[in-house]
Image: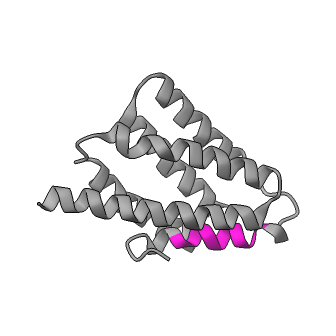
Amino acid sequence: MPAILDGAAADVDVVSGAGSWSSPDLQGLRDATAEGERAVTQRAWPALGSANMHFHRELGALAGSRRLDETMEQVLAEMRLVFSVMADPHAFHAPYLAENQKLLRLLEDERYEEARAALAHYLDIAEAQLLRAMDSLAG
């Protein structure tokens, strides 16, 4: 699992356990996805980044763990700091809306193992992108 996104690894754990749920409440994920779609329509790229963070907060919340919620809030706060200095928030955030839509569809279709694998791949890509962005800021 990506080292820079260790807290986000909890998302993968949540999705891995999703098959044991009787009926997960996915409304928060739907709302965050719709928020991202509105941001794209409005060309509001920082809002798209916020919507992505809301998606991950809601994904973690599916576990029903206050401790996990607190961990996710800390990770997301750190990500907001990185995002606040991004030179091109559109290029950075745009690919994640489609990935969030894909994850939501997989969860709605109860294809939990595929969702887990897709999320793990998503986080690997996100880690690489974040490291590149941080390198460019430092350089």
The reply to whether the magenta stretch includes residue 94 is: no
Residue 35 occupies quadrant: top right
Identity of the residue drawn at 88% across and 63% down: 22
Residue 66: percent from the left, percent from the top? 58, 69
Residue 17 left/right relative to 96: right
Q: Quadrant of the C terminus?
A: bottom left
Residue 123: percent from the left, percent from the top? 50, 64
Taking 109 as reference, is 125 above or below it?
below
Residue 121 occupies quadrant: bottom right
Name the one closer to the observer, 124 or 61.
124
Residue 135 occupies quadrant: bottom left
Residue 57: percent from the left, percent from the top? 54, 56
Taking 28 as reference, is 67 above or below it?
below
* Residue projecting furthest to the left: 139
Magenta: main secondary structure equals helix
Residue 40 left/right relative to 30: left
Identity of the residue drawn at 50% across and 77% down: 1
Identity of the residue drawn at 40% across and 65% down: 127
Identity of the residue drawn at 14% across and 61% down: 138
Residue 50 left/right relative to 23: left
Magenta residues, start to end: 9-18
